[in-house]
Image (tube, grey):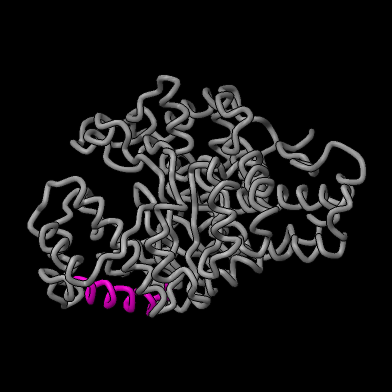
Amino acid sequence: MAGLTDPDLLFAAEGRALSIARDLYAGVKDLPIVSPHGHTDPRWYALNEPFPDPAQLLVVPDHYIFRMLFSQGVRLEDLGISPLDGSPVESDPRAIWRRFAEHYYLFRGTPTRLWLDHVLEHLFGIDEPLNASTADRHYNTIAGLLKQDGYRPRALFERFNIEVIATTDGALDDLQWHKAIRDSGWQGRVVTAYRPDAVVDPDFEGFLGSLDRLGEVSGCDTGTWAGYLDAHRQRRAFFKTFGATSSDHGHPTAETANLSDAAAEELFNRIRHGSDDERERKLFRAQMLTEMAKMSRDDGLVMQIHPGSWRNHSPGIFQKFGRDKGFDIPTRTDYAAALKPLLDCVGLERDLTIILFTLDETSYARELAPLAGVYPALKLGPAWWFHDSPEGMRRFREMTTETAGFYNTVGFNDDTRAFPSIPARHDVARRVDCAYLARLVAEHRLREDEAHELALELAYTLAKKAYRL
């Protein structure tokens, strides 16, 4: 019986481009995985406990899965997603898995289908399509394997050939699990990344209380502007002791500001006292992106900016289930004007790296590629989130390469909470890039030896360089 994935997946259908893509892919498919940005849980690697069951491993933590099912009328509670008030939720993992399998056809044509088929076949040895009739059989296979030591987190980390993975942790996190990993003596490289959203965004729930907590954990007076900035410097330094090479900023927009010290201090004082002026709150977020960029210039952390998501778009879902439940929606994003205050301040710094992501593909050719194609500090992050798909990756290459080239991009990152999908996501990215390079060679726009060099860069080297790993 044929497997779930084809050896020529995502390559040209025929001809020279197909042959070249095969050769390019053969040279990169087994390279180590560098995962410089993602959301896996560091406690997995610290405790190294077996994953509990197929539903908890593959369904419950993956918003790509449950948002699609919810859109077709499946209740989140029926997928094991717990309401904040503790009301009843489906607790039988086999029932959750059956419900998922019954609706698996909904993922036809989506990247989620590619990732999951890859996981089922290459991780669990399953070659039958997932549906209602195979649900129990596949559940039993996966559940049995998860009991084996070879399917614990550290063993999978090594099996996946992960060279380094970064988690994303809030500014107030004590990084206890990273400490446990380090103290365990295990050689897997798991680093952290500094995510300060909760203490730079006045609209983040509990913001003022988080500022108090920031003062406590840093030993700085976060009641003053100078003390608040020092607190960030202290926390960034603390994160660096656990391997951090980057910070990560998930702002609603890319808007930046570059106020005078006196004006910034005055603004902070108003925000610290609970200003409800929306313009002031936006301005504070904008100023803090520039402040974070200046700190990155000083301490060497690579700065990632992830703007343009209308997070928690449904207030009903947010109030009932909390954050990250599939209701984050892309918005139009301005970069050329929004980033100018920051770029006027630090954009020409050659030793600073700011990686820009977008959910607004219309900005690729119009703004992002021209900006990254001239400002030394800027690099373009890969197609992200809703666009980390074969078509999204192709569009990214087609719309940015002519202006920014390949070397103002940073390879691929998987940005995932779904640990087993990491090899699948990297495989898709490598295939798409090899297919794109093969097309350039077939069209006589690139020499074949250059394509082989670029395939290595895009799959491995650029991410290591950009993220200083």
Asked whether residue 145 is in view, the answer is: no
Q: Name the residue: 87% across, 60% down.
A: 447
- Image x and y of residue 79, in percent: 39, 31
Q: Is residue 232 magenta?
A: yes
- Looking at the image, residue 468 sits to the left or right of residue 308; the answer is right
The residue furthest left is 273
Tell me the quarter of the picture where residue 183 sits: bottom left
User: Any magenta on residue 9?
Assistant: no
Place of residue 399 in the rendered image (x, y in percent of width and height, measured from the top left): 65, 46
Quarter that holds the N terminus = top right
Q: Nearer the viewer, residue 432 or 38?
A: 432
Residue 77's place in the image compared with 272, above or below, is: above
* Left or right: where 468 falls relative to 2: left
Q: Farthest residue in the right direction?
A: 15
Vertical relation: 431 (above or below) 379? above
| Closer-to-camera residue (120/329) | 329
Residue furthest to the top in view is: 73
Provide the residue span drawn in magenta.
228-244
Quadrant containing the C terminus is bottom right
Q: Is residue 77 visible?
A: yes
Residue 434 appears left or right of 404? right
Q: Main secondary structure of the magenta part?
A: helix
Q: Viewer-proximal residue, 172 or 65?
A: 172
- Which residue shows up at 41% across the image and 39% down it? 60
Q: Position of residue 359 (x, y in %)?
A: 48, 43
